[in-house]
Amino acid sequence: MAKFDAASGYRPETLSVRAGQERSQFGEHAEALYLTSSFVFQSAAQAAKRFSGEEEGNVYARFSNPTVTMFEERLAALEGAEDCVATASGMAAIMAAVLAHLKQGDHIVASNSLFGATVQLFNNILSRTGITTTFVSHTDSAAWEAAIRPETKLFFLETPSNPLTEIADIRTLAAIAHAKGILVAVDNCFCTPILQKPLEMGADLVIHSATKYIDGQGRVLGGAVCGPKKLTEEVFKYLRTAGPTLSAFNAWVLLKGLETLKLRVEAQAANAAQLAAWLEAHPKVARVFYPGLPSHPQHELAKAQQKNGGGIVSFEVKGGRDQAWTVVDHCQLLSITANLGDTKTTITHPASTTHGRISPEARAAAGINEGLLRIAVGLEAVEDLQADLERGFSLI
Ligand SMILES: *Cc1c(COP(=O)(O)O)cnc(C)c1O
């Protein structure tokens, strides 16, 4: 079969549906789901060669599985990465990327507005292995440089940030890191390769929670680490031994998710842009956070590194928690859930959910106030979303 990889020159639309597919002797048109934990060998000698790595091929599904490999190759093609290693979840991808490249005594500089579980992982789990983290302002590149120590091995960021959609400057941070031989990992969950290609801007590794936009329909957990083979090889070695591998079934679901990724992400971003503009003009809204709006403080930087504003819109309802909760509680269409990237629009009150465990002072310092709501825009008609929000707005 022809290879449709990143080097083939095919466009993202084509790669989304073609890249990575390996057809069996049965000639199936759709990608096959290989539910098998192990693979048989033709002889003892072949088994020995497969185990030693002298001969390429599948051995055991903790190491590789053809359905998982198809997903990896398709995502790598979309990210423009030489290689991709799939993991059981987004958190497993972050853990694998860090433990593959860092050891006891090493240091991470990370954004102070990372996904909550990532902060917990760095502070409460990785710290036990002797890997320490300094958190710095997401948008202040000089603070990243100032936090570098001789033992700093990794810059870890996520852009736009959740829920305030602040933009970290990938090109500038990569230049600062590389001047000191430090690796840069970007969690590209919010934008996906459809809107942002961190590797092209100097990142060394791209990390995904495939659970979000890549599945896009709220069905399975998955993750991935993409980058040059010399870096992903270490991630693979960690994974085959430590075990947080992506299951074949989840890989098959995610592989089919990739086929519609571009259509979904672009349609969701267009809906989000329309909703953000409507919210900004709404008399009950104090402020809107959306990188696609000219009022966003980093609108120009956002335009320079991502294709559009993306699918996540946050806004402050005038008043505080009561007013914000009134809007949430009168939604009949928007789902009250913290998940994002789904075709179904979701709404969440960060101060009492995703950021509820942070002290009120720290929350205020991070700019997450009691009136803030985050919407992850789906594929419904924007007019229907507006009518759903208006029900609550009209009561406050
Ligand atoms: C959800 C999420 C993760 C974690 O992914 P899981 O698949 O839930 O483990 C990591 N980073 C970001 C930005 C996320 O939104």
Image (cartoon, grey):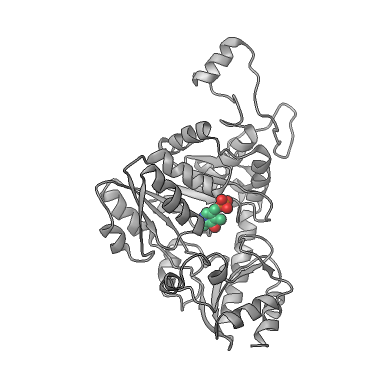
Assign the C terminus to one quadrant of the image: bottom right
Residue at x-position 65% and y-position 23%: 39
For residue 58, above or below residue 360: above
Left or right of 209? Residue 334 is right
Residue at x-position 67% and y-position 88%: 394
* Residue 186 point in image, percent of width and height: 44, 53
* Residue 52 point in image, percent of width and height: 49, 19
* Residue 94 point in image, percent of width and height: 48, 47
For residue 218, above or below residue 335: above
Residue 194 placement: quadrant: bottom right
Q: Nearer the viewer, residue 363 or 205?
A: 363
Residue at x-position 50% and y-position 59%: 116
Q: Nearer the viewer, residue 113 or 383?
A: 113
Residue at x-position 36% and y-position 44%: 130
Q: Is residue 80 visible?
A: no
* Residue 302 point in image, percent of width and height: 44, 66
Left or right of 285? Residue 255 is right
Assign the N terminus to one quadrant of the image: top right
Residue 347 placement: quadrant: bottom right
Left or right of 385? Residue 168 is left
Q: Quadrant of ligand 1?
A: bottom right
